[in-house]
Amino acid sequence: TVVETLPGRGWYTRILVPYIGAGGRFFGANYEIGIFQRMFGDRWESRRAGIESWSQTFPAKAASYSDSSPETGAFTIGQAPAELIGTVDRILFIRSLHHLNRFDRSILDKAAAEAFALLKPDGIVGVVQHRAPELNDEEWANGSQGYLKQTRVLEAFKGAGFDLAAASEINANPKDMPTESDRVWRLPPSLRAEGEAREANLAIGESDRMTLKFVKPN
């Protein structure tokens, strides 16, 4: 049983669903509507219909990615079905934590606590997240620019009861050294820049990312 947070357009879902296969279970977990409203601002009305219907449309879409798909479902982060408590093997937070922290730090803490409750003993949380330099301003690194400090992520998951089992630099990029005037979306794949800035950001490549493995103690 695997939960993927913020599946978006399904890049990882297309990998996970065939991998889990028949006999397994796969759930997408999205932000609550209020977070999306604040994220999109003036663009909310153009995104609203798809987001509000997501929990109804996602399970069938996910199942379509394999001829032998697992049982599929969907829920809102912070509102997980009670029947899932203590039954999940793996939860993935892949570049999804910053929006859980940016508007209210307690939302990230609650998401980590919910993950702890959902997992079986020895269950694993995998995190990949845009990494802010530890010396950068705290407000800038609150997630609003896409970046979080690794210390903040450790604080949230250790505070929920998890042990940090491993950390990898496989997704590190030392060329990405953002200042307080930078946003992660300046870099590929978003690449929201023009002219010389675009070329400079292409040369940097994708963001520097932490890769962390947390385990729920037995």
Image (tube, rainbow, N blue to C red):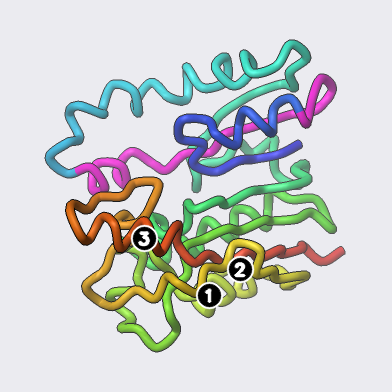
Instruction: Say which of marks 2 and 1 sits in front.
Output: 1
Q: Residue placed at 79% from the left, 54% from the top?
A: 123
In the rendered structure, the answer to whether residue 23 lies left or right of residue 63 reads right
Q: Is residue 31 above or below residue 67?
A: below
Q: Position of residue 65 (x, y in %)?
A: 64, 18
Q: Residue placed at 36% from the left, 64% from the top?
A: 143
Q: Position of residue 186 (x, y in %)?
A: 29, 57
The reply to whether dot 2 and dot 1 touch (C-beta < 8 Å) is no
Circle 1 residue: 150
- Which residue in the rendered view is the most extreme toward the bottom? 135
Amino acid type at circle 2 is Phe
Circle 3 residue: 146
- Which is more N-terminal, label 3 or label 2? 3
Q: Which mark is residue 157?
A: 2
In the rendered structure, the answer to whether residue 124 lies left or right of residue 56 reads right
Amino acid type at circle 1 is Gln
Residue density around tag 1, few if under 14, some if 14–19, many if 20 or more, within 10 Å: some
Q: Residue placed at 39% from the left, 61% from the top?
A: 203
Instruction: Say which of marks 2 and 3 sits in front.
Output: 3
Amino acid type at circle 3 is Gly
